[in-house]
Amino acid sequence: MALILSGRKFARVVKASLRERVAALQGPPPGLTVVMVGDDPASQVYVGAKEKACKRVGFNSTVLKLPVETTEAEILDLIDQLNADDSVHGVLVQLPLPDHISDNRVASAVLPEKDVDGFHPVNVGRLWRGEDGLFPCTPSGIVSLFHHHDISLTGKNALIVGRSNIVGKPMAALLLRENCTVTVAHSRTVDLKEQCREADILIAAVGIPEMIKKDWVKPGAVVVDVGMNRKSDGKLVGDVAYDEVLDVCSAITPVPGGVGPLTIAFLLENTFKARLNLKPPAGN
Ligand code: GUN
């Protein structure tokens, strides 16, 4: 029987540890500001969950909701103000943004030290160079989940299905840092099924419901499902056909309760890290 890698349980451990570290802090608590543009229903749910999680661990949390017609210049101006505000340690601009706003220009406007999403080019560079920095929350959470369960990574063949800037690419960088041999597959990959069957560590982040079937998985592989898809009958499923893959893998994350809660827990970790980098006032 495969080990169920419960992100929900591990996220509780991370948050309990954060609560203690916040209580022991000298000075102001960590402060996160989330900016949301428009009223995308999924974003509203995610942003609400982020706000609630912040409050639970003793962070200050502010959500700024802007109308969909907000211009890019107005958002960049707001980010400048947040960059200059010493009570704000982390700034997160919720994606997706409306089409008239460039994700990349917005990501580059947030100070790297406040970039709790890890999307700023400086943090991306630090990640690939093996330096310290703020790195994307979902892949960071996945690597910590592996460590929490003593899953060995060195020398393992890791296959990531999906090449997004939020998950696939940073996941590749983090697994390289863990000494995996990393392959990134995507929609144009030839023989995806065969590639998947070679993987000791399989990370599915494609957004296609239950695409990864039992005969795509190497016996004993560790499977992480980043997918979150709503089927026509309303059921929430991942990118992996969970019930059947359970029979062949050695460990697997469920959906829901797998990777989702980790993303929020590691957003909190990044915000705490950003707060620790706070320089003491001159003279102290
Ligand atoms: N929308 C979906 N996932 C994310 C994320 O990790 N960060 C931001 N900023 N927006 C998202």
Image (cartoon, rainbow, N blue to C red):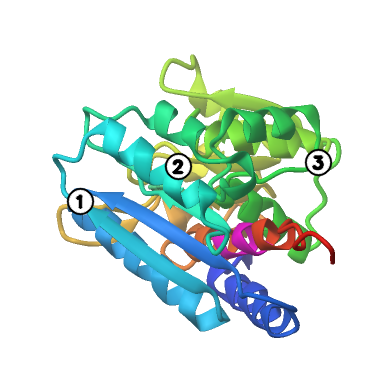
Q: Position of residue 279 (x, y in %)?
A: 75, 57
Residue behind label 1 places its C-beta within 8 angstroms of ligand 1: no
Secondary structure mostly seen in the magenta stretch: helix
Residue 157 in sight from this viewpoint = no
Eyeballing the image, is 115 above or below 233?
A: above
- Mark 2 crowd level (few <14, some 14–19, many ≥20, 10 Å Cα): some
Residue of label 3: 178
- Which stretch is magenta? 267-272
Residue of label 1: 40
Q: Quadrant of the C terminus?
A: bottom right
Q: Residue at x 66, y 46 (%)?
A: 134
Q: Residue at x 81, y 33 (%)?
A: 130
- Mark 1 crowd level (few <14, some 14–19, many ≥20, 10 Å Cα): some
Q: Position of residue 35 (x, y in %)?
A: 35, 53
Residue type at the position of mark 2: Asp
Q: Quadrant of the N terminus?
A: bottom right
Residue of label 2: 80
Q: Nearer the viewer, mark 2 or mark 1?
A: 2
Residue 48 occupies which quadrant of the picture? Answer: bottom left
Q: Residue at x 41, y 34 (%)?
A: 106
